[in-house]
Amino acid sequence: MNISEETYIINLGIHIRQLREKKELSQQDLADDSGMTKSQIARIETAKINTSVKTLVKIAKGLDIELKELFNFSLK
């Protein structure tokens, strides 16, 4: 199966949003907990930007999960 980078980025953003919502956090809550801006969280969740591993580490910390959990999703 040949998955495009764009598809992977879209699915990663969706998964981050789902994890955030499961913890009942707003985008602003996650931004505050990760040391980021709300707009950056929004752009990641909507696949407007391709984020760095450094930023994903911050998001994982903000969600209080291990980094590998960010990548535990099925591609759609």
Image: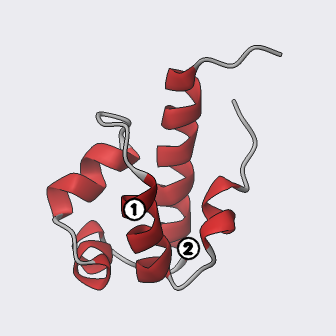
Identify residue for label 2. 22
Q: Earlier in the sequence, mark 1 or mark 2?
A: 2
- Categorize mark 2 by other alpha carbons within 10 Å: few (<14), some (14-19), many (20+): few
Q: Quadrant of residue 34?
A: bottom left
Q: Decide if residue 49 is on the left or right side of residue 57.
A: left
Identify residue for label 1. 54
Q: Position of residue 11 (x, y in %)?
A: 57, 39
Cα gap from disc 1 to disc 2, whole angstroms: 23 Å
Query: Label 1 is placed on what type of residue?
Result: Lys
Q: Look at 18% across and 63% down and name the residue there.
A: 38
Q: Look at 69% across and 30% down and name the residue there.
A: 76
Q: Look at 46% across and 81% down and name the residue there.
A: 61
Q: Position of residue 14 (x, y in %)?
A: 51, 46
- Whether residue 53 is visible: yes
Secondary structure at badge 1 equals helix
- Any mark on residue 66, and which? none
Q: Look at 73% across and 56% down and name the residue there.
A: 72
**Depth order, front residue of 9/27:** 9
- Residue 69's place in the image compared with 15, above or below, is below
Query: Label 2 is placed on what type of residue?
Result: Lys
Q: Position of residue 74 (x, y in %)?
A: 75, 42
